[in-house]
Image: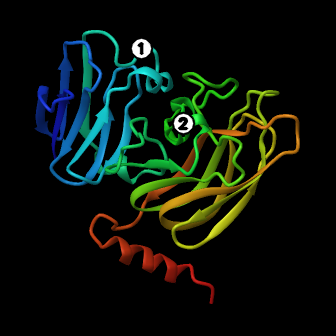
Amino acid sequence: MELTLKIVDADGFVLASATAQDETFLVYRQNYSEGDCVVVEASEPGHVFLALDNAIHAGLVYIRESAYAFAVPFGDKRKSYSPNAFRGDIHRLSAKSARPDDIAQRRNLAVNPWDDHANRSLFPHARANVETRGEAVFAARNAIDGEKANDNHGFWPYTSWGINRDPEAALTVEFGRPVRIDEIVFYLRADFPHDSWWQKVSVTFSNGGTSSFPLVKSGAAQGFSIEPCIVEWVELHGLIKAEDGSPYPALTQIEIWGTEAPDAGDRNVAAVVAEDKIEHATP
């Protein structure tokens, strides 16, 4: 896989770039300006270890389209990232094609520190029907950014998905290809007594199934094994709030554990999902 990293300004002018086969590095020796974007280009769809700033951990992500553009955050959007990220006059970026053994291992398939609202090509991607006051520190992307600190709120590293007190709130995690999942883990935001919590949540899978999970008032990981299934997305909904004195339940992180779907890279997505439905159909 040929990989390219670029820094592009608001007018589309390429400020710096680097291209190599399977692994590339870009050192950008200037301050970022508002409107700058980091662009990742890949010669084919595939899995990539992506590190777009040295203050944020690298993520194993799946790039489905030929290019992905990440807008360097400024203003309110910067609050959901480390205060050391995207600052200064020297930046090291890297992209590396994942090895087959990296791809094959069981892992959390729902982590992408580079996700944002505009993302349509780098997976996983999180989206929601509501976010508290439209603030970056309560955006859907925070539920898959890999940050699990949850005893406070409103600033990094205490990022979370906030539902703006909406009982109909729903969060969807898209994988961009079929994956086989077997476990879901929830990290509730636990800034008690400011925060409330959900007694029960439901998850609907793209294969048509729905499961409900009982939760407790805790900031610890709450994990649930599920019947292994092949999906392209999952939706979290049916959030039943505890009857307590706070109106503010929130989700710090959702982990969805599993593996790549067998032969997903060689066959039509619909065919893979259809085969799984037949395999798990009730006699």
Q: Secondary structure at mark 2?
A: helix
* Residue type, mark 2 in image: Gly
In the rendered view, does 128 fall on the left or right side of 232? right
Q: Position of residue 37 (x, y in %)?
A: 25, 30
Few, some or many residues within 10 Å of mark 1 (<14, 14–19, 20+):
few
In the rendered view, does 154 fall on the left or right side of 266? right
* Residue 263, placed above or below residue 131: below
Q: Nearer the viewer, residue 127 or 60?
A: 127
Residue sitting at the far top: 88
Q: Position of residue 179 (x, y in %)?
A: 44, 61
* Residue type, mark 1 in image: Asn
Few, some or many residues within 10 Å of mark 2 (<14, 14–19, 20+):
few
The residue indicated by pointer 2 is 134
Instruction: Please state which of the two labelled residues, at mark 1 or mark 2, is closer to the viewer.
Output: 2
Q: Residue at x 66, y 29 (%)?
A: 150
Q: Earlier in the sequence, mark 1 or mark 2?
A: 1
The residue indicated by pointer 1 is 84
Q: How many marks?
A: 2
Q: Residue at x 19, y 27 (%)?
A: 7
Q: Position of residue 196 (x, y in %)?
A: 79, 37
Q: Residue at x 37, y 26 (%)?
A: 73
Q: Nearer the viewer, residue 283 or 231?
A: 231
What is the spatial separation of the Cα atoms under label 1 and label 2, in whole angstroms?
Answer: 23 Å
The reply to whether residue 75 is visible in this rendering is yes
* Residue 75, placed above or below residue 46: above
Q: Which of the 4 quarters of the picture holds residue 246?
A: top right
